[in-house]
Structures are given as C-alpha cells and as structure tokens.
C-alpha cells in the first residue's frame, strides 16, 4: 500500500489488487493489466491518471463521502505527481511474477529517465540566448509586416 496527499490535505491509500483492477475495468473500461498501453497513457494523461486513482481509492472515497468531482478538485500539481508514483509502484508490485516486476520496474525507470532528459533539453533550449535572439527577430519581423500593410478601406478616400 502506498499513500499520497491531495491538495485538500486528505491522505489516500492506493492498493492495487484484483478488486481494484476489476473496479477500474468496470468503471472506466481501462485494463490495468494491459501494462504497455495503460502505463504509457497514465504517464502522460493526468486526467486519466486521476480517474484511475479515484477508482482505485473509491472504497475510501465512498466511506468518506467524497465524490469524483470533490476528488478531482483536490488534484493538481504535486499531488498528481505523488499519486502517479504511488499508483505506478503499486502496479509494479501487483505483478505475480518477480521477473515481470523487475522488468516493469526497469521499464518505468527508463521511461522516467527519458522524460527527465527531455525536460532538461527543453529547459536548456528555453534558456538559450539563441532562442531569445530568434524570438526577438520573429517579433521584429511581425512588427515590420504590420507597419508595411496596405491602408484599410476606411482610410482610403472615395473617388
């Protein structure tokens, strides 16, 4: 069992077991056992991720009278990141074969490393003086094109 806190300060417990997998399948039509498809989508789609997490946590939400809307309103930023980590770790631990758990763990580590690297490349590019010059040149070109536009019909005298 893994836990995370939402932005309302509530602590949620994520437990991936057969019951949770069936609940996600029944409520969302998503098969958590289709690891390749689902994990990839969960890693990039925060809305699907929060829907899945809500389904996994639904018994707790029901016991505390928290609707899916209430849950979603308390999910943003760091709480989504913490929930994603908790869910992914639980999915890895759910696999009955230790070799599959190990392989899935490696795949997730590689995906995370690739994502971190992509973020660093983007950050480097955004902080690049070259990008600043390119933006300045583009803005200058746009300004010049507006300055050289033909007069509007209202400002042209009738003949």
Image (cartoon, helix red, strand yellow):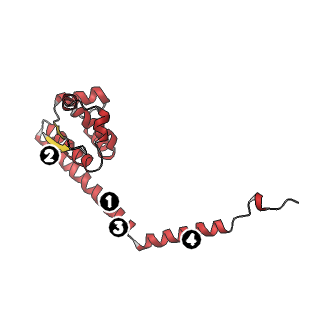
Res 149 → quadrant: bottom right
Q: Which residue is mark 1?
A: 119
Picture coordinates of residue 95, whole percent (x, y) = 15, 37
Crowd tier of the residue under label 3, counting other residues whose Cα lies within 10 Å: few below 14, some 14–19, many 20 or above: few
Residue 146 falls left or right of residue 101 = right
Q: Secondary structure at mark 1?
A: helix
Q: CA distance from mark 3 to mark 2?
A: 33 Å
Q: Which residue is mark 2?
A: 102
Q: Which residue is mark 4?
A: 140
Against 25, residue 119 (above or below) is: below
Q: Secondary structure at mark 2?
A: helix
Picture coordinates of residue 23, whole percent (x, y) = 24, 28
13 and 38: which one is in front? 13
Q: Nearer the viewer, mark 2 or mark 4?
A: 4
Q: Looking at the rendered structure, which numbered label has been put on residue 151?
A: none
Q: Nearer the viewer, mark 2 or mark 1?
A: 1
Q: Which residue is mark 3?
A: 124
Q: Secondary structure at mark 4?
A: helix
Picture coordinates of residue 56, whole percent (x, y) = 22, 33
Is the residue under label 1 in contact with that under label 3 (CB below 8 Å)?
Answer: no
Q: CA distance from mark 2 to mark 4?
A: 54 Å
Which is more N-terminal, label 2 or label 3? 2
């Amino acid at each position: 069992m893994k836990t995370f806190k939402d932005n309302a300060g509530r602590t949620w417990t994520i437990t991936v077991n057969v019951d949770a997998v069936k609940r996600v399948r029944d409520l969302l039509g998503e098969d958590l056992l289709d690891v390749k498809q689902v994990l990839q989508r969960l890693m990039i789609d925060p809305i699907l991720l929060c829907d899945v997490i809500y389904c996994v946590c639904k018994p707790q939400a029901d016991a505390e009278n928290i609707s899916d809307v209430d849950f979603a309103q308390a999910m943003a930023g760091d709480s989504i990141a913490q929930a994603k980590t908790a869910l992914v770790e639980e999915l890895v631990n759910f696999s009955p074969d230790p070799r599959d758990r190990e392989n899935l763990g490696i795949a997730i580590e590689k995906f995370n490393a690739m994502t971190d690297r992509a973020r660093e490349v983007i950050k480097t590019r955004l902080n690049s003086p070259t990008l600043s010059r390119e933006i300045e040149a583009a803005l200058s070109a746009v300004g010049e094109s507006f300055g050289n536009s033909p007069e509007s019909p209202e400002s042209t005298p009738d003949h």
